[in-house]
Image (spheres, rainbow, N blue to C red):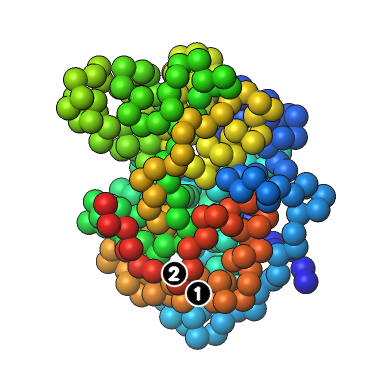
Amino acid sequence: MQPLKHPTRTVALRRSFPVLAGLIASGLLLTGCAAPSDDSTVAADSAPTIDTLKADATLAAALPADLRDAGVVRVASGVSFPPMEFFDTDGTTVVGFDADLGAALGQVLDVDFSFENVNFDGIVGGIAAGRYDLSLTGILDTAARQVEVDFVDYLQSGVSILVTSGNAVEINGPDDLCGHSASVEKGATGDLTIDSLQAVCAEAGKPAIEKLPFPDQASAVQAVSSGRADASVALDVTLAYTVQTSDGAFELAGDPFNTLPVGIVIPKDNPELRDAVQGALLNVIESGVYDQILVKWGLEKQALTGAPINSGVE
């Protein structure tokens, strides 16, 4: 077995934020395992080996001709969302679950998956406009998003709430966010979740949530660390990782809620690409490499097999 190689990627480093930079400096953010599974932590020097896959000629031939000819799939990704994707210590290499999955898909399809760092709120629109071929960045598959794009689903995830350790703000679930400030990544799941919770607060006669949107997840976490926000709302996969790599600075408030599938985002008008990616994902799952990547990043509890298309219903 050989380690899974990442394709070459040209990505611009976002400005660093104190929490994320501090974790990188201490080595805590790059353990290669993190996550929602309490029993799945793996030290960096003992991270599981990931098999290298052979190209599947039939699936590779099913790719749109322009991608076959280019040999590159342009991947839009918000590279500040560990353990799904984040920058390695060199400041340019993208690592994480999605990076490993993209490399495996590229091996099967005989192309490179080239990750481009994009603000989350511009990803779905960029895909629909053809600026990127697809997106791998932990986006929930929802009925509303299916109007613009298609999803090939590969994980399942819920929404979690991050607070500082000790939970002095006494937030224990979504209903407790009313009257508090909550940081979110602009346009991401947390942002949309807060919007839906505002009606719940109003119906209960409680004050509205003060939503604080930021361009990336690292900034949203920093807002909680600095005291600017009482809590941060995002997918459980990233907030559980943040807790486990924060040296006790944060905790999760309550259990995850609103569980939905996470999908690879593909233009609505490109079923050829969608079907080729679905076939490649099934190949990765059946080969056992999908399970290897799950274990590496501690996401076994988020596993979703079958590679369904547009299975999100909310």
Residue in the picture at 53% in, 41% down: 238
Disc 1 to disc 2, C-alpha distance: 6 Å
Residue 307's mark? 2
- Which quadrant, please, contains the N terminus? bottom right
Q: Position of residue 138 (x, y in %)?
A: 46, 50
Instruction: Reply above or below: 275 against 266.
Output: below
Q: Nearer the viewer, residue 15 or 24?
A: 24
Residue in the picture at 33% in, 49% down: 124
Crowdedness near tag 1: few (<14), some (14–19) or many (≥20) residues, C-alpha within 10 Å: some
Q: Nearer the viewer, residue 61 or 35?
A: 35
Residue 159, picture quadrant: top left
Residue 127 left/right relative to 73:
left
Residue in the picture at 63% in, 60% down: 293
Residue, far bottom: 58
Residue 194, picture quadrant: top left
What amino acid is at disc 2? Ala
Residue in the picture at 74% in, 59% down: 48
* Contact flag, marks 1 and 2 (Cβ < 8 Å): yes
Q: Position of residue 243 (x, y in %)?
A: 60, 33
Can I make out residue 57 in this image?
A: yes
N-terminal of the pair, mark 1 or mark 2, is 1
Q: Position of residue 170 (x, y in %)?
A: 45, 19
Instruction: Reply above or below: 24 against 311.
Output: above
Residue that carries the numbered disc 1 in the rendered image: 282
Instruction: Reply above or below: 113 against 64.
Output: above
Residue, far right: 45
Residue 276 left/right relative to 15:
left
Can I make out residue 127 in this image?
A: no
Q: Secondary structure at mark 1?
A: helix
